Amino acid sequence: MRYFHIAAIPGDGIGQEVLPEGIRVLDAAGEITGSFRLRYDYFPWGCEFYLRHGTMMEAGALDILRRYDAIYFGAVGFPSVPDHVSLRGLRLPICQGFEQYVCYRPSLLLPGIPCPLAGKQPGDIDFVVIRENTEGEYAGAGGRAHRHLPLEVAVETTVMTRAGVERILRYAFKLAMQRRRLLVNATKSNAQQHVMTFWDEICNEVSRDFPEVRVERVLIDALAARFVLRPESLDVVVGSNLFGDILTDLGAAIVGSMGLAPSGNINPEREYPSMFEPVHGSAPDIFGKGTANPIAMIWCGALMLDHLGEAPAAEMILRAIRAVTGCAEARTPDLGGTSTTAEVTGAILAAMRAQAK
Ligand code: IPM
Ligand code: MG
């Protein structure tokens, strides 16, 4: 029996509703496989915490989190706090401070899910976006001067380091080797003549170590169109922080719902804990109704188990998700159904138990 210590951060909005559902599934996976047990500590960080204490998380938060095997994270952001404050106070310091430089975001068309693109079958869409997660457009380099004067100016500079670009590209190439050996490099080196040409050059250098991987350099605007027109041509897509951010909302939309898109913020060297969070945000518009789709959060749990070396449990959860989407009995409103969050989780738990029999 293996034991893992998990830091649970529900955060804001529907993060508070879906995280407990994910934990029900994680615990059941541990029971059914008999291979591991999870222990959780909860941290009430987020916008409510900010309104009371003036910071998104407590002092020394990273020192506390560092002791855990992984972080299970709901969502951050609420209308009561400016978005740039909530982001820069919680998710970003964790991703950057813990060198979670890989943001791993699969897009998979599940059985039974109506695809907004015409004529696509399950299996037609199956790719992973690897988003650089610690620098680039999110580096925070810049400032404002001449505040409130006619001369006012704002500057925000993309920062790309050779080490930072190389490590994310290497990870993407390695992943492509385990998949269909197709790598799309999302770039914009025609317009961004400094940072993106640098990125492309490093991509060329790294590609020499992976001669079996076919690399395509695709400009980000054309790539956005290709996500819609020919998603079946994609396997691994690697992009900068902002490009990856935009592409992964698109990736979630084409597989049917933001509520189906999981994400892992990963430190591949395992020097620090990795953090697993759905791509969707806190969704204040549906918060409190009990109808948020828990599947993205549950799938994040599977990614977390996989990262912790519990692949059979992760696969069991994914099979149960497929079984539930495939039979269309339990569906939340984002998928056109009327089920509650807890009912969908219940169906997934039942599908896991049925597999175990
Ligand atoms: C995401 C989100 C965040 C991001 C927001 C909440 C700032 O959109 O995880 O994709 O841009 O990174
Ligand atoms: Mg995003």
Image (cartoon, helix red, strand yellow):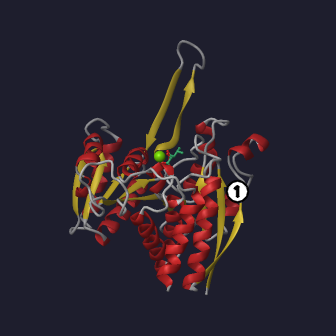
Identify the image quadrant of residue 164: bottom left
Q: Does residue 217 appear anywhere in the picture?
A: yes
Where residue 26 appears, as percent x and y from the top left, is: 58, 72
Q: Does residue 100 appear anywhere in the picture?
A: no
Q: Is residue 160 above or below residue 190?
A: below
Q: Is residue 316 above or below residue 195?
A: below
88 vs 297, nearest the viewer: 297
211 vs 248, nearest the viewer: 248
Where residue 174 appears, as percent x and y from the top left, is: 34, 68
Q: Name the residue at 40% across, 58% down.
A: 168
Residue holding disc 1 = 61
Image-based side of 201 in relation to 80, left or right: left
- Name which residue type carries label 1: Ala
350 vs 155, nearest the viewer: 350
Total number of numbered discs in the rendering? 1
Numbered disc 1: secondary structure: helix
- Check disc 1: other Cα within 10 Å, few if <14, some if 14-19, many if 20+: some
Image-based side of 264 in relation to 126, left or right: right
Residue sitting at the far right: 52
Q: Name the residue at 56% across, 27% down.
A: 144
Identify the image quadrant of residue 233: bottom left
Where residue 285 appears, as percent x and y from the top left, is: 58, 40
Where residue 4 appears, as percent x and y from the top left, is: 63, 76
Q: Name the residue at 60% across, 42% down.
A: 284
* Mark 1 residue CB less than 8 A from any atom of ligand 1: no
Quadrant location of the N terminus in the rendered image:
bottom right
